[in-house]
Image (cartoon, helix red, strand yellow):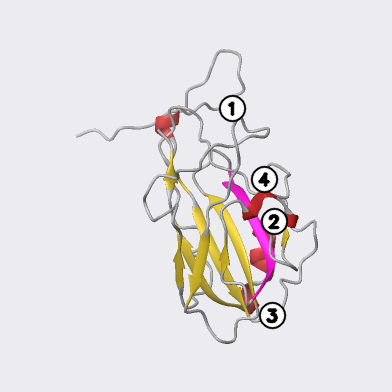
Amino acid sequence: MTAEVWAPQRAPGRSPHETHRSPSQLTMKGNPYEGLPAVPSFQLQSSLIADGETLPVAQRSGSFGAGGSDTSPDLAWSAFSEETRSFIVTMYDPDAPTPSGLWHWAVTNIPAGVTSLPVGAGDSDETLPAGARHLRNDDGLRRYLGAAPRPGEPPHRYYVCITALKTLTAGVSDTTSPAMALFETVPNTIGRAMLVPVYGA
């Protein structure tokens, strides 16, 4: 039996370093949080999203393509550590066809007394709880960016994650990326909850 060898497809005139992959050849990455230090989990619920279920509010605007509204889902969390002093909310797509996936949403400095966000809380900083603020997503916007994989791609996973911190703030600047914010807060992370809905063809 001969092993099948995959060779990159290259259009005439292209550099050998430029390859083309069809949507069906995209590789699903693993859980992006598995490489972080293990912390206790807690409860996260929503009336609109659930593990493995299709996002119902998944239209997005902006430079990545699809039109429509960008409406964040409702979220409610509980059973986190009593030592929690603040939360970070993020949404990340590891299956986006980029080397680093795609960050759709990041909110820092949510006070420990806040345990839910209503539908549309991600519209702007003005729709967030007092003290909380958005970091820029990968479209350069300080707001929630909905899902819209390119036509023909396999369904993408969207890791909606609540990170519990033992500090009153994340301690990051307004120019910090979502990925770097989570990296810099690893020493102060004491819990994590997530839901992983999907969206795509």
Chief secondary structure of the magenta portion: strand
Could you say where residue 61 lies in the image, as x and y percent from the top left?
Answer: 63, 34
Tell whether position 21 is magenta.
no
Residue occupying the point 53% across, 52% down: 73
Viewer-nearest of discs 1 and 3:
3
Q: What is the C-alpha distance between the residues marked 2 and 3?
A: 23 Å
Residue occupying the point 51% across, 40% down: 58
**Kind of residue sitting beneath label 2:** Thr
Q: Nearer the viewer, residue 89 or 154?
A: 89
The residue beneath circle 3 is 167
The span picked out in magenta is 99-111
As drawn, the label of residue 3 is none
The residue beneath circle 4 is 138
Viewer-nearest of discs 2 and 1:
2
Residue 111 visible: yes
Vertical position of residue 97 compared to residue 104: above or below: above
SS under mark 4: loop
Q: What is the C-alpha distance between the residues marked 4 and 1?
A: 23 Å
Left or right: 181 as drawn, with respect to 99: right
SS under mark 1: loop
Q: What is the C-alpha distance between the residues marked 2 and 1?
A: 43 Å
**Kind of residue sitting beneath label 4:** Asp
Residue occupying the point 76% across, 72% down: 171
Q: Disc 4, disc 1: CB below 8 Å?
A: no
Tell whether position 108 is magenta.
yes
**Kind of residue sitting beneath label 3:** Thr
As drawn, the label of residue 127 is 2
Q: Earlier in the sequence, mark 4 or mark 1?
A: 1
Rendered-image quadrant of the N terminus: top left
